[in-house]
Image: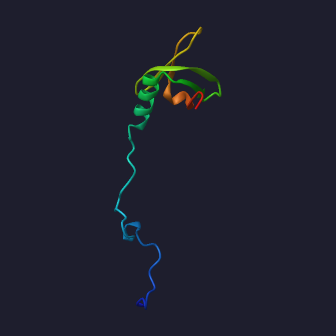
Amino acid sequence: MEKQQGSKKKFGGSLSSKPGAKSGARAPEITFEESKYLKRLIENGAAVRVRLSNNEEVQGIVEYYDSSFIRITRKGQPNLFIFKHDIKYLIEEGA
């Protein structure tokens, strides 16, 4: 077997060998930022636009949410319960 000479390093070292890196550190799967954001929208009564996975858009105010859906209250139209998995994105109107 051949020995490594000088400052040559083997390729494929672990990421944890870098200074300041934590071994096995992963970003948390649940940050609770979604809940904070939806709660803020409700408290401020902010108008939102929701684009659904079928590209349909609805506008209104988020009145309620839980782990599965949000409730959008609309003026002059029926209120909607929208499953979160059907939402492509949600943005504040006038933001």
Q: Which color scheme is applied?
A: rainbow
Task: Return the x and y of residue 22 as percentages of the image width and height.
Answer: 34, 62
Task: Return the x and y of residue 43 as percentages of the image width and height.
Answer: 42, 23
How many labels, in total? 0
Give the quadrant of residue 57: top right
Q: Say which of 25 and 46 sits in front.
A: 46
Q: Residue furthest top?
A: 76
Q: Say which of 85 and 40 sits in front.
A: 40
Give the quadrant of residue 34: top left
* Residue shown at 64% from the left, 24% from the top: 56
Looking at the picture, does residue 17 appear above or below residue 35? below
* Residue shown at 39% from the left, 44% from the top: 29
Give the quadrant of residue 88: top right
Looking at the picture, does residue 9 appear above or below residue 25? below
Which quadrant holds the N terminus? bottom left
Task: Return the x and y of residue 10 as percentages of the image width and height.
Answer: 44, 79
Looking at the picture, does residue 24 appear above or below residue 43? below
Task: Return the x and y of residue 8 as percentages of the image width and height.
Answer: 46, 85
Which quadrant holds the C terminus? top right
* Residue shown at 40% from the left, 32% from the top: 35
Q: Residue furthest left?
A: 23
